[in-house]
Image: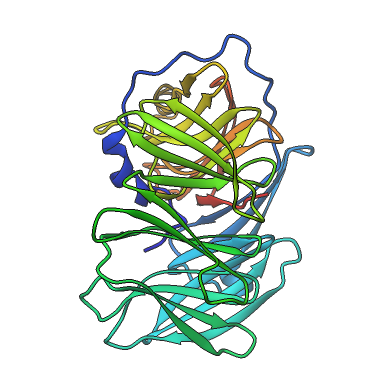
Amino acid sequence: MRSGNLLMLVFVASFWACSDDEPAPANPPASTIPDFTALGEDLEHVYLYTYNAGTATGATANLTLENAIDKQFLTVRQVEEVLTFFTFSSGSFSAIQLNVRTGESRNLENVYTIDDDRSVIWGTNSEEQLYFGYYRPRGSTNFGMRVVDIANNTFVDVLLEDNVQNVYEPFYYQGKLFVTYRDVGGQYHTEVFEDGDTSIRQSLEFGGGTPSFFIEEAGDLTMITSTGGNQYLKVLYDFQTLEPFSETPFSVNRFFPPGPLDATLADERLYYLNFYAQPSPVPFGPAIYDFIRAENQIIDMIGIVQELEEASGESITLTAYDYRAEGRAFLLGYTSDFSNGLFQGGVLVISESGELLQNLETPFIPISFVKS
């Protein structure tokens, strides 16, 4: 159930990946090592690791000891500077909210007690509300959502669609919740809700085209929809009105999974998480699609990982991904299978041209990066 670990996505998306891509641009922009914050874990604890590139130092906080965050948390969501860790115990969902800047936290205990009539499939939150997607009755695919008010612990149930084929990860950003599913007829829908309102503000319909979306550099909504084969349509929506204002067809031999996409769009370049065709020694890695040049650049993570393995004599498994525009660099978390028994991992900093800028070793496994 945990969505903070990218390895859960590998088996879904890697089957569709292909390998006929363009080489790296001759003169890529310069990359630098950025500041970053990562979540990590070992066998017993959850950690928050903050790296300062200016001083080349990192600080580690033990969230299990300091904030009572259990390693068995189900998923973690981020809204601005606050991380919400969802947990489940004795038939009830609870949450711990942590402000990564101030270190302050609050417990939200037993916010949703389930019964035998429902099966919960995801949880997310805004600043004032918690959202739980579920099937009801249990064993069916009748898709609904419970909205819990954090302040007074009241709730409202919202029925979305009966007999859906698939439900995808939710996405919350600046007052809007995006809920994506595929109906019984194979049509894709994204329903948009606003803070404080349990009615659907707007429905985005995509027919049979797979919709993937994210927020681009200027803060607008970007939708990438498949139109058949390797053909896609990139549509920019004004985030406030959700009115489309730009459309760009493009072709790339990649599969973008439905729902929220771990991607960034800046200067007509799409920085995204690429899944390698399996079997492969590396499950995923960074990629860049240039809309101006119509070129797709796949960073050679297989080669980078193999070099590190040869140097260390130990196997490396990638665990987390992020792109940092401020450094024009990719971050890849990993774990090492050390024969000496030490529980270790690290963060690889990769330039846009595919150069390994730094290998920062950590005494835990990075499982996700906190968005800046």
**Residue 83 placement, left or right of 164:** right
> Which residue corresponds to the image point at 53% horizontal and 21% vertical from the top-left?
354
Callout count = 0
Q: Is residue 129 visible?
A: yes
- Residue at left 22%, top 74%? 140
How far across and how far down the image is residue 308, in percent? 45, 27
Viewer-closest of 368 and 250: 250
Task: Please determine whether, in this image, residue 15 is positioned above or below residue 124.
Answer: above
On screen, residue 10 above or below 302: below
* Quadrant containing the N terminus in the rendered view: bottom left
Q: Relative to residue 15, is residue 132 drawn left or right?
A: right
Between 41 and 9, the one nearer to me in the picture: 9
> In the rendering, at what x and y percent does residue 328 appear?
66, 30
Q: Quadrant of residue 52?
A: top right
The spot of residue 38 in percent (x, y) is 59, 51
Q: Residue at x 64, y 76 (%)?
A: 128
The correct choice, above or below, for 61 with respect to 33 in the image is below
Between residues 187 and 153, which one lies in front from this camera angle? Answer: 187
Q: Which residue is farthest right?
A: 54
